[in-house]
Image (spheres, rainbow, N blue to C red):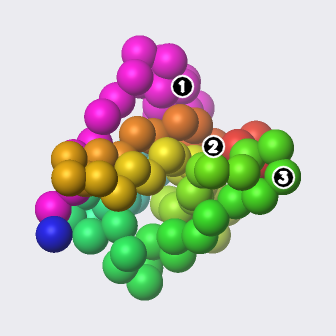
Amino acid sequence: MSYTLVFTDQYTRRADRFLKRHPELKQQYLKTLQLLEANPFHPGLRLHSLSGRLDGLHSVSINLSYRITLELLVTEKKEIIPVNVGGHDAVY
């Protein structure tokens, strides 16, 4: 049930900025990505779909304050495309 993370250039820049601002979260961020790749439906990620202007996207938690929004493509390729990373208000 393994998925593939597909990083866009835009997301990579956002993630780099996020990690520069929050170097203490690097391990939690990397652990979240590993768990997302292994099983995006793991309860610890708190995966949920978004609505409104973010309809079609999902969100997972890095911790209680920080999130990753993503596009979860459940196809034969099982791809996950991260879109944004940051605090709750920043990504929503």
Q: Which mark is residue 86?
A: 2
Does residue 42 appear left or right of residue 61 in this picture? left
Quarter of the figure with residue 63: bottom right
Residue type, mark 3 in image: Gly
Against 51, is 40 above or below?
below
**Main secondary structure type of the part rendered in magenta:** helix
Does residue 38 appear left or right of residue 79 in this picture? left
- Residue at the image point whose x is 54% and y is 25% from the top: 14
Against 16, is 24 above or below?
below
Is residue 40 highlighted in magenta? no
- Residue at the image point whose x is 60% and y is 50% from the top: 57
Q: Position of residue 21 (x, y in %)?
A: 58, 32
Spatial CA distance of label 2 from label 1 is 9 Å
Mark 1 Cα-neighbour bin, 10 Å: few <14, some 14–19, many ≥20:
some
Cβ–Cβ below 8 Å for labels 2 and 3?
Answer: no
Spatial CA distance of label 2 from label 3 is 19 Å
Tell me the element at label 3: helix
Mark 3 Cα-neighbour bin, 10 Å: few <14, some 14–19, many ≥20:
few
Q: Which mark is residue 52?
A: 3
Is residue 6 highlighted in magenta? yes
Magenta residues, start to end: 2-24
Q: Which mark is residue 14?
A: 1
Tell me the element at label 2: strand
